[in-house]
Structures are given as structure tokens and as C-alpha cells.
Amino acid sequence: MKTRFGFLGVGIVVGIALMLVGWQIVQRSYRYQGSLIDPPLAAPDFALNDQSGSSFRLSEQRGKIVLIFFGYTNCPDVCPLTMANYRQIKSELGVQADQVEFVLITIDPERDTPERLQGYVSSFDPRFIGLSGSLEEMQKVWESFGVYRAKVETGSASGYTMDHSARMYLIDPSGNWRLTYPYGFENEKIVADLQHMLREAN
Amino acid sequence: MKKTNPLRPYLIRLGLILVLSAIFVGIFNEAVFLLQKDQHDRAPQTIELVIPAGTAERVAAGEDDPAIPAEMVFVMGDTLLVRNEDTTSHQLGPVWVPAGATASLAMGEPAKLAYSCSFSTNRYLNLDIRQPTTLNTRLTALLLATPTMTALIFIYSLLVFPVGGKQPRQEAKAASPKEGEA
């Protein structure tokens, strides 16, 4: 009888050990699905104003993942779709979304006042952050993030639209540029990357 | 008296047909593969591209980078690795690379994609991601086709050559009274 319990105990221990080894193998073999910057590169720091007028400094977000997208509130297609993607990603992350900041940085500071950004981002989610600043401040940020933007006069009542790059940047909890996602990248893959990075960070 | 399993002749026939089907499907598969294979029927690999220093200036001056084709073909599982030696960030399709950094992207499902490209004068790059025909694909085809073919030939063989088909005639002969015995 004693021997039987001994074997059972050894079996349980070996089983748990094998599960842990398997889990480690799965974790190590994870391959990020976005465009991976490796080795990671320190993201250029910036300080801009959020929609409530408070200062938002990138380097103060350490410990959290920051998703950044450059767009504008008058955008007819790419920006609202990306904000809707933000909302879906946040929803799929569940409670883990508390460790992620979802940021929209304007490429049209002339029209995107804090008030306008407030209405825009909160229509998607009140926790989303909309950043703007003076043209000089903004130009430094656009340049450091390699953002393309160009005014396109339409002659319509809205005056103009903006051509702009539409990639999403992922800044890891150490403040590094780690991943970027082209426009239209599947949300499920972004969520998987975020979940893996959060597991790694914790 | 030794009792024989009535299913035995069926099982022997099924086994033989299974072996013959596997051989036939295997030969057929390989023949088709050899006739149709191209350079993209290969295992996934890492494709490395280097953006040399001064590329942005050359593109601004209207010169294309001759090392980057307008269309790139990958197979599923390939990794596109881009090393940017220029002083400005660059975008090669879905891969954005800050100045002096290296970025990579694993190619997922088969698709034809068009992306913007910062170091091509036409500003666009087409990516074609294909499903390669590898040893695994061929083995999968073999495993899928062999049982189906076995089942079809087995059923067909039962109709054309029934198991023990001669026996009933012999038994009938034995049972029928011989001429002159009546």
C-alpha cells in the first residue's frame, strides 16, 4: 500500500514538473507577430498635453505598455477604424488592459484642440488618451517617430484632409520601441503580443 | 477443427490494398511535385535586407534602390529582417525600422499585400506570401489521400471480386446430384 502511494506521489511530482517544462518551452518559443525591433531601441521621450490639459510624458509610463497611433479627429477612415481597434483590443485584454495605455497623437494640431480630442477619444473609450501640443512640439515628436503627414486641400467645408502614416507603435514597459503594426493588422495577433509581453514583464 | 475468423480474408485484402494505395499515391504525389515545383517550394528561411546609409537622400533625388525589387515573394513562415544603416527611419512594407536599428516580421498566412515603401521612388511594395509545398505538405497529402483511395478500391474490389466468390459455386456443384446418381 505504502509503495503504491509512493508511486502515486512520484507520478504527480513528475507530471507537474513536465507541465512546467512544457509551459516554459511554449513561453520561450513565442514569436511576436508584429514587426519586431530587435534589439529594442529606447523610444524618444516627449511631453505633450492630454485631452484634459494635463501633461503626458512618455518616460513616466514605465511599467506599462503604451500603444501609440498618429491620427486626427477629422479623419474619415483610418483613424476611427484604428480607434475602434483600440477599443476591441482593450475589451479582449480584460483586466490586463489596466497595464496598457492607448494613445492617439494628433497630426493636425490646428484643429485638434484638447476639447475636440476629449470628445473624440471619449466617444471610443473614456480611458483613451488624446495628445496634442504646439506645432513646434508636435513636429519634434512626428520627426522622432518617423511620421509622414501631408495636408490635402479638398475644397470642401472641412477644408482639408491629411495623408499620414498609419502604423501603431508598441512601447514596452521599459520604454523601448519594441513592435510596430501596419494598418489593418489583426487585433487578435496584437492582443496575443500584448498578453505575452505582459506575462514577460510580470 | 480450427475455427477461422470470417473477417480474415477481408482484412488481408484491405491491408494489401492499403499498401498498394500508399505506394501509388506516393509515386503520384512525388511525380506531380517534381513536375510542378518552383523555387518557392522550400522550408521557411530568414531573408535579410540592408538599407545602406544615404538611401533617403538617393530616393529624394529620384534614384531607386536597385537591391529592393518592387515585388517580393515569401513562403509562409519566412522572416523578413531589415537592417537600417541609414540616418532616418524607413518603411519596407509592413516593417518599420528606426535609424540604425534592425526589425523583423514573420510572414503569416498566404496573401498578396501592397504596402507603402519609403525607399522606392514609386512608394509601393507588393508582398506575395505563398504556401510552400514541403515534405510535410506532401506527407499530409499522402495521409489524406491514401485512406480514401484504399476505401474506394476496397469497395470496388468487393463488387468485382467478392471474397470467397468461388466457394459458393463449388459448394453448389458439390450439392447438386451427379448425372447418373439419380
Image (cartoon, coloured by chain):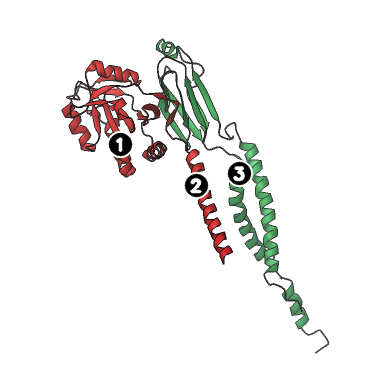
Chain colours: A red, B green
Relative side of A167 to B9, left or right:
left
Q: Nearer the viewer, residue B24 or B108?
A: B108
Counting other residues with Cα less than 10 Å from the Cα at mark 2, is it few (<14), some (14-19), or many (20 or more)? few
Q: Secondary structure at mark 1?
A: helix
Q: Can the viewer see residue A44 in this picture? A: yes
Q: Which residue is mark 3?
A: B138
**Residue B160 location (% of width, % of height):** 67, 64
**Residue B85 location (% of width, % of height):** 47, 16
Relative side of A123 to B163, left or right:
left
Tell me the CA gap for discs 3 and 2.
34 Å
Relative side of B13 to B42, left or right:
right
Q: Amino acid at mark 2?
A: Leu
Rendered position, B18 above or below A60: below
Single out the residue that lies furthest toward the right.
Answer: B180
**Chain of the residue under the numbered disc 2 shown in the image:** A
Q: Secondary structure at mark 3?
A: helix
Rendered position, B127 above or below B167: above
What mark, if any, has residue A86 been given in the picture?
1
Q: Secondary structure at mark 2?
A: helix
**Chain of the residue under the numbered disc 1 shown in the image:** A
Of callouts 2 and 1, the N-terminal one: 2
Q: Which residue is mark 2?
A: A20
Quarter of the image where the N terminus of chain A is located = bottom right
Tell me the CA gap for discs 3 and 1.
41 Å
